[in-house]
Image (cartoon, rainbow, N blue to C red):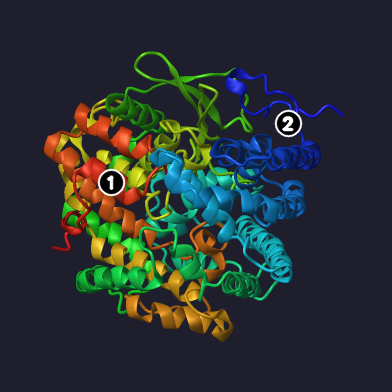
Amino acid sequence: MSNPLLEKFTNPFETAPFDKLKTEHFLPAVKEAIHLAKEEIEAIKANPLPTFENTIEALDRSGNKLNMISAIFFNLNSAETNDEIQKLAREISPLLTAHSNDILLDQELFSRVAQIFQQKDELNLSAEQKTLLEKTYKAFVRNGANLSKEDATKLREIDQELAQQSLKFGENVLAETNRFVHFVENEADVEGLPDSIKEAAAQTAEEKGKPGQWAFTLAYPSYIPAMTYLKNRELRKTLFLAYNTKSCKGDELDNQDTIKRILQLRYERAKLLGYSSHAQFVLEERMAKSPEEVLKFLEDLLEKAKPKAEEEVAELAEFAKKLDGIEKLERWDFAYYSELLKKEKYELDDELLRPYFQLEHVIEGVFQTAGKLYGLHFTPNKDIPVYHSDVTAYEVKDRDGKHIAVFYADFFPRAGKRNGAWMTSYKSQFEANGIDHRPHISIVCNFTKPTKTKPSLLTFNEVTTLFHEFGHALHGMLAKTHYQSLSGTSVYWDFVELPSQIFENWCYEKECLDLFARHYETGEKIPQDLIERIKKAANFQQGYQTVRQISFGLLDMAYHQGNPSTIGNLFDFERKIMEKTDLLPKVPNTLMSTSFSHIFQGGYAAGYYSYKWAEVLDADAFELFLERGIFDPETAQSFQKNILSAGGTEHPTVLYKRFRGREPKPDALLRRAGLI
């Protein structure tokens, strides 16, 4: 059988052959690519004299075919999955884990790496080469190269099972999200819902075989507006309980035992490698160095944010009581009354803004912002195959017309796509033999779909989400390094959110909004007074939002900083950890941990704090743009050179200081959030 994954990619820029792919191509392709990667490793070992070039550089360049095939497969498993692909993931995942272990536990290979590492001071290496050498050496040590044969076997078994448990966790959350649908027959029950959302709910009901009704699901574009606008308190409660009891009902999709097993395996792995906990293992390779430093960072922030958060919740409770006689503000009331209070205080709500944020215009605005800052131009290219009709592929060029990247954009929810928004890479940038191999980058979101009468109109929150993910994409697209393991977003995890979070700041500036925020019917630019209200409302309930993020960071650390065998009932454990950050009454039988995909399926285990950590960096960095002008060419050029293009070539503190001229200070974040 000819296999498009194993042949030379002939599409423009050697992009993924989505137009020729079938599910049955993946397993044989992965097996053959592993075989080819093993041959590359054997060739490295066969070289009699280990050098930086024939060992460290060669290792970084090995397995390219396998990396590309894996990226295609696992991106599809997130963005366009089905039962067949999920079943295949359970088969492919252990093969990749075993292959990775084969490399990192290969004593002969490690002895070559160690030999070069011991000579590092005599080798006259560049800063980037030193980083690659240290990263390669540490990768072996941190993945068991110094273990006995017996312990290495244990590590392999742990890694195999961890990969399976993580897949199972994600499959359960997706299945829970997909199986819930709540139909409403009486139009009075959808009072408060904006026309566009109401039409979308009617369209969903029609698609699900109930014309004339309204359907609500747990997908973000359905759930979030329902919680924000539905006047019917009981309906909000029903949806809230469905959302917050995902995978914790004791049935076949329950994730409680899966979580305990993941935690136990991570702990055993860390102990095997000589660390006291999974958090200690993870944080050795972070800006925040230790669990103690993370906890101090979160506790200091909590101390500043909680008094403000308590004021905000008290104000909202008083408002709800005065408006509707609500005696006890519940969690399913929060978004609804917050929206009403925001409207009263700032004469601003999502529905007032939504007409100015047609998706196509916002995309155009994102592209123009990237153009003004970094000279990039985006052109749709229909010759580049895509994996779903919703996806658009673009060629990206610089101001001189030189090819920079391929960019894929995938914006709408569907059954085969997990919730949320993310940036991903199909091919990283790297240089080899004088050729700069440019990257293939994608962003995946779940935005409000167009209806029969209206285009896709985004909430302001969706606008900032698009800018956020595009900030990650810029990090990937503008990469300019020699080695792909140091390219783009391959940086310390608590530094990776800086490019994404700083890019959100442009959404609040008139100079940027004027590029794209115009009424979808009249073409009128967003009025100045609305921009002023957006800026004033930016601090609305920032204390509450900060405490909420801290609560997730603290829960993550609690799971990973000690021995998880002491964790009994997950409901009790989560409640106890969240007590110090709880601002609203706890709802019995709800559990967020069982759908906390960031830490049990994504890469944020012992790293969720990094969102707040990076906020310190982004607020501090953006103040420089504010001082000099948000499109100041010199500042943009410095940010591109020292942050976006540099990837992980040097320690993030070095790169940040090179851009900012000093270490980051938290004052800018506290000012921006209205906490000082």
Picture coordinates of residue 288, whole percent (x, y): 36, 62
Q: Is residue 18 above or below residue 204?
A: above
Tell me if 197 is positioned left or right of 185 in this view: left
Q: Disc 2 vs disc 1: Cβ atoms closer than 8 Å?
A: no
- Disc 2: CA contacts within 10 A as few (<14), some (14-19) or many (>=20): many
Q: Is residue 115 above or below residue 390?
A: below
Q: Is residue 326 above or below residue 289?
A: below
Q: Quadrant of residue 504?
A: top left
Picture coordinates of residue 468, whole percent (x, y): 37, 43
Q: At numbered mark 1, what does the secondary structure look like: helix, strand or loop? A: helix
* Callout in the foreground (2, 1): 1
In the picture of the structure, the residue carrying the numbered disc 2 is: 5
Which quadrant does the N terminus fall into? top right
Q: Nearer the viewer, residue 127 or 247?
A: 127
Which quadrant does the C terminus fall into? bottom left
Q: Residue at x 47, y 75 (%)?
A: 561
In the picture of the structure, the residue carrying the numbered disc 1 is: 656
Picture coordinates of residue 456, whole percent (x, y): 44, 35
Q: Quadrant of residue 25?
A: top right
Image disc number at residue 224: none
Q: At numbered mark 2, what does the secondary structure look like: helix, strand or loop? A: loop
Q: Amino acid at mark 2?
A: Leu
